[in-house]
Amino acid sequence: MSTLLVPYYEHPSVRPAEWEAVLAAAPRLYGVVLNPASGPGDRPDAAFAEVAARLKEAGVRVLGYADTGYGRRPHTDVVRDLARHRDWYGTDGFFFDQVASGPEEFAHYQRLAVAAWGVGSTTLALNHGTAPHPWYARVADVLVTFEGTWATYRTLRPQRVAGAGGVRHCHLVHGVPAGVDCAGLARARGADIHCAVPGTGDHPWGTLPHTLEPAR
């Protein structure tokens, strides 16, 4: 079952074996977040373009990363990133990071969603990191309702967003020890999709889930 959403923020030329492991896991992946430079960068990157093409050929959704700064980043800057992801990497959709969760910012994100659909997005994931106001379910295909450490996740109670309908829920967990059945825990906590990595500190998404790590 395709339940893994993998945000892997390493360059293919630096971590080729890891990217091959991601590609090999294609049947298990809901999608992969493509993040060349905290977004698409200032110019196309041939290595990421090749990875994106191979993922799409394998039937994996490719979501372009866009930082929204909890609603503070200007609309035009985010939309520019969306267009670049589509033009340079042929992304299927987008992963909005640092998304506000309150009703006050919803209109801003509704406009961004319209812009995403306008450039051909078929999948829109919003990373709130916590349960957002129910309105956000109107524009999202995926709501990330938890992002945080394994220590915190162990105590998390099941979370659902009222009125979410067919929206899928995702939990992103870092600092996860080997041997943990995070897929089972995610289901028990109300998530349809998950990613659990061993990384810690400021850059945990430079590591892969234990089950995807390449053989050494």
Image (cartoon, grey):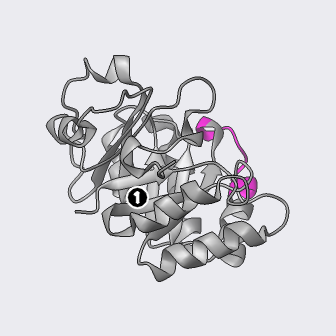
Going by the picture, which residue comes out furthest to the front? 216
The structure residue drawn at horizontal position 69% and vertical position 55%, both measured from the top left corner, is 78
* Residue 111 appears in view: no
**Residue 89 to residue 13: above or below:** below
Query: Is residue 72 highlighted in magenta?
Result: yes
**Quick one: quadrant of the N terminus?**
bottom left
Going by the picture, which residue comes out furthest to the bottom? 57
Quadrant in the rendering for residue 141: bottom left
* Residue 179 appears in view: yes
Q: Position of residue 77 (x, y in %)?
A: 75, 54
Which residue is tagged 1?
Answer: 139
Drawn side of residue 87 relative to residue 109, left or right: right
Q: Position of residue 143 (x, y in %)?
A: 37, 47
**Residue 209 to residue 87: above or below:** above
Going by the picture, which residue comes out furthest to the right? 42
| Circle 1 SS class | loop
The structure residue drawn at horizontal position 48% and vertical position 45%, both measured from the top left corner, is 208
Drawn side of residue 140 relative to residue 93, left or right: left
Q: Kindly identify the amino acid type of the residue bearing the numbered disc 1.
A: Val
**Residue 135 to residue 31: above or below:** above
Most frequent secondary structure within the magenta stretch: helix
Range of magenta residues: 70-78
Query: Is residue 23 highlighted in magenta?
Result: no
Quadrant in the rendering for residue 206: top right
Q: Position of residue 132 (x, y in %)?
A: 37, 36
Q: Position of residue 202 (x, y in %)?
A: 63, 26
The structure residue drawn at horizontal position 71% and vertical position 56%, both measured from the top left corner, is 36
